[in-house]
Image: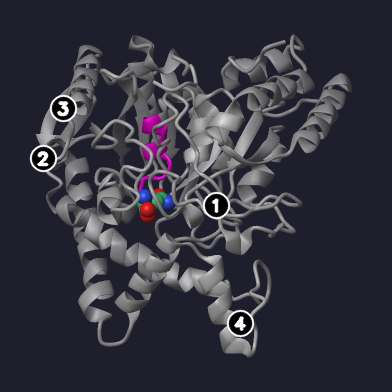
Amino acid sequence: METHSLSAVELAECIRKRSVSALEAVESVLKRIEQLDAQVRAFVTVDADGARAQARALDEKRARGEALGLLGGVPVAVKDNICTRGLPTTCSSKILQNFVPPFDATVVERLRAAGAVILGKTNLDEFAMGSSTENSGLFVTRNPWALDRAPGGSSGGSAAAVSARMASLALGSDTGGSIRQPASFCGIVGVKPTYGRVSRYGLVAFASSLDQIGPLARDVPDAALLLRVLCGHDPQDSTSADRAVPDFLRDLDGPIRGLRLGLPREFFGEGLSREVEDAVRQAIETLRSAGAETLEISLAHSEYAVATYYLVATAEASSNLARYDGVHYGYRSAEAGDLYRLYAATRREGFGAEVKRRIMLGTYALSSGYYDAYYLKASRVRTLIRRDFEKAFQEVDVVVCPTAPTPPFKLGEKVDNPLEMYLSDIYTISLNLAGLPGLSLPCGFSSEGLPLGMQMLGRAWDESTLLRVAQAYQRRTDFHRREPKVSLL
Ligand code: GLN
């Protein structure tokens, strides 16, 4: 049976009611991967045998009359910077190409406990540094809507897999937009939870004060379901919050009448493509017709967000990536006259250009004599950015804006211009600096048929309201129901 076109909520329900088996569900997506992934290239590793074995075990469990869990039998793809026991976890980097973790990340444990089937690992920009998946040290992923376009990044493989129906759901990570921007480019829903909501244990660290794992899904209910499974306190991550997790799925269908939506002036200005702006404004009208009120707000310091991010994130990255030295695990250079040469040659050969650029920038920003001028100053601006949001959320319940300034760009178009690439995250980065939750959802198509996304930003711990507004929108529109044909435009 072809189950790949069912949503995760529908599929879990079919499996629970025994009209579909977990094995059938896995076979359906494996076939899809076989048909499409030679072109899309979303997956770094497809664990076909492992997925079948997990599905059989679930079917046996079901036959014994046991409950399977919220995601019982649903095939899920995992971004390849999230550790999976016994399955390679490469971060799409040569330096970790042969790394097989001896443990599961907490989110992967939670998926397994909820009965999900781990299908495989998806491509990303090396160590999640990028916005197009072109910085992958392995290969480039293509956008299923148009194979000559970028799927976005860094969770481009996960977004492409869900969009092309090669997985029901996927995990991404978002440090500066890496869940929301690829969700927007691939026409799906992506949620970046509040910092501390989801455990980072087993997520290979890029910038620890910004990183957060979250769901990529076809629609809002699917995202709510996966988010529910991922959230919860984890003693293994000292930044994980001990807070009650709402039943996101149950709370979804409430009214939005009277909710106040803020439109940040700074996010509708220069650099925003006309098509994206029109689609987002149209979507805002739809929300107004559902009873929401809108008002203009200001996030005055957002013009400094990209600069601030590229100091904070690179400083943390330079420290986090110091551990790849060729000694404990991962790639080791054959050129090892002495310890220093081993470190230097391993890192020179193992890291790609963008990762090296970030390590150098971060090391510089932290070095004595420059620390106050760069890192400290960036930390202060970060506080100002957070305060802008605090002020805004005194007046409004949700902030609505574009996810990315343009429709999906062409592969190759920005790779040689890092600054231009960095600017594609101009609307997503402030949220990470403030530690708040955000979501991207499809809100239209460009004249060329490319997906466009809108973003909703919320108060800390208030993912529920974001999902409710997003669901109110999806109940009135059908952009999220369209499937890519997977071909060249
Ligand atoms: N594109 C941004 C960067 O290159 C954000 C990446 C991310 O969120 N992981 O750093």
Q: CA distance from mark 3 to mark 4?
A: 51 Å
Which of the two labelled residues, at mark 2 and mark 1, occupies the earlier sequence position?
Answer: 1
Disc 4 element: helix
Mark 2, ligand 1, within 8 Å: the answer is no
- Percent x, y for residue 16? 72, 17
128 lies above or below 160: below
In the rendered image, residue 101 lying in the magenta stretch gets the answer no
Given residues 321 and 375, the one toward you in this image is 321
Question: Does dot 3 land on a helix, a strand or a loop?
Answer: helix
The reply to whether callout 3 and callout 2 are in contact (CB within 8 Å) is: no
- Say which quarter of the image contains residue 447: top left
Separation of residues labelled 2 and 1 (CA atoms):
37 Å
Image label count: 4
User: In front here: 64 or 445?
Assistant: 445
Please give the range of residues in magenta: 176-185
Query: Picture quarter containing residue 456?
Result: top left
Residue that badge 3 annotates? 274
Do callouts 1 and 4 mark residues in contact (Cβ within 8 Å)?
no
Mark 2: give few (<14), some (14-19) or many (20+) Cα within 10 Å.
few
**Quadrant placement of the N terminus:** top right
Inspect this view and state whether residue 317 appears: yes
What residue is disc 2 on?
A: 270
Q: Are marks 3 and 1 in contact (CB under 8 Å)?
A: no
Q: Is residue 177 magenta?
A: yes
Location of the C terminus by quadrant is top left
Identify the residue position indicated by label 1 in the image: 199
Q: Nearer the viewer, mark 3 or mark 4?
A: 4
